[in-house]
Image (tube, grey):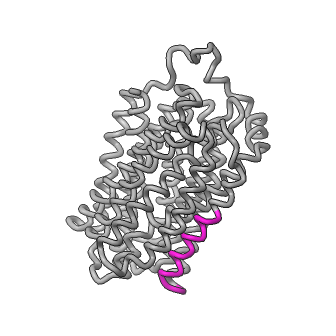
Amino acid sequence: MQTIGVLTATYGAFYFCRTNISAALPGLKAELDLDNADVGLILGASKLAYGLGQLVNGQLAERVSARRMLAVGMLGSAALNVAFGFAAGLELMLFIWLCNGYAQALGWTPTMRVAARWLEPAQRGRAIGIIGTGYQAAAALTYVIAGTAVDWIGWRGALWVPAGLLAIAAVHMLVGLREAPDVHASASGTSRDPEALPLVQSILATLKNPALWALALALGLLNANRYGFLDWGITHVTETTASGSIGEAALEYAVLPAGGILGALASGWISDRWFGGRRAPVIVGALVLLVVLTLAYRDAVALGTIPTLLCLVSIGFVMFGAQVLLVGTAPVDLAKPGTQAAAVGLVNFFGYMGAFTGDRVTGSLADGYGWDTAVTFWAACAGGAAVCCALLWNRRG
């Protein structure tokens, strides 16, 4: 449990320098005279780099020290966030945030590699669900910290304060993380840390696994919805309500990942306990509810703070309940032996291609057709993800 605790805190800390940009966007747009399409380009570039990084780092994590990868990613992302705060032009911001996307991509695949070394398949749903609570808690905390920093010192504070927190977390990881148990064996005596396959064989084993392609498409569509809320949510609230306070909108959005903490824990436990390791029924149920709740949120924002909060906490529960299974547990379950990190990398690559596309489409729809159309697009993406996961209804690890 000590290792799970360190992984939870370590990967969660990456979100200090990822979701913080949401609080910076309104001030950044005003100071640099950017429109939503420009912002979508910056956000999309980060997702593109993150997705490509996942594809590369999935293979790298099978062969390179997890501690080394995590340290480079955490310290690199912190430095890039500081640099972004000093940037003053669209092109430079685009380049820096693209690099930050790759630095962020050094987090998840080594985390899953360490988890696969420590955990039996029957434990993965609950344990990875616990790891998932870390990035929900960090995301909620980031909204509060970054939003408060903006109110006190301007939009650059949303970049600089979280960067300091991520650097501190990197030191904690280097001190506390053990990459593997002393003996890589289960109670039955079989290894749960198979040697990495040769590179070409690993790539082919991953690409020829049809279950991973269904998960990849589903995660791409879910991420278009998820990053609609995470990246654009504060901008949406400030532009469609009379308040206009970034700090107040950030506090409202803090309940989204707070609901996600409960969803991540519940989905892993339910899929282990009631479905015998079958993840798809839980994912599909959560995604169908996400469609309904996204459409409800579209109308609730105009009704006031309480309806908005209720929608967002419910959305967080079902969104991250599905996401934590798609992003880690299901790919690890359905991967060929010795390719768990590679499988996670492939699925996450397509997940962030969906996030990249979603950011670009959201910005264009908001500018051209209004926010109601953009939020409806988020709901449609969640529905498409449910269809993809339904194809795996009876599959288990």
Look at the image and give the residue range highlighted in magenta.
368-384
Q: Nearer the viewer, residue 74 or 210?
A: 210
Q: Which of 341 and 158 is in front in this view?
A: 341
Q: Which of 157 and 95 is in front in this view?
A: 157
Residue 305, picture quadrant: bottom left
Please state the horizontal and vertical placement of residue 104, each as a whole percent of the image: 49, 49
Please state the horizontal and vertical placement of residue 5, each as a whole percent of the image: 39, 33
Residue at left offset 35%, top offset 64%: 253
Residue at left offset 64%, top offset 35%: 340
Image vertical order of residue 62 relative to residue 76, above or below:
above
Magenta region, main secondary structure: helix
- Answer whether residue 79 is visible to the viewer in this image: no
* In the displayed structure image, the side of residue 394 where residue 321 appears, left or right: left
Q: Quadrant of the N terminus?
A: top left
- Answer whether residue 86 is visible to the viewer in this image: yes
* In the displayed structure image, the side of residue 231 where residue 189 appears, left or right: right
Residue at left offset 38%, top offset 55%: 259
Residue 145, picture quadrant: bottom left
Residue at left offset 49%, top offset 26%: 179
Image vertical order of residue 181 relative to residue 198, above or below:
above
Residue 169, picture quadrant: top left
Image vertical order of residue 55 relative to residue 115, above or below:
below
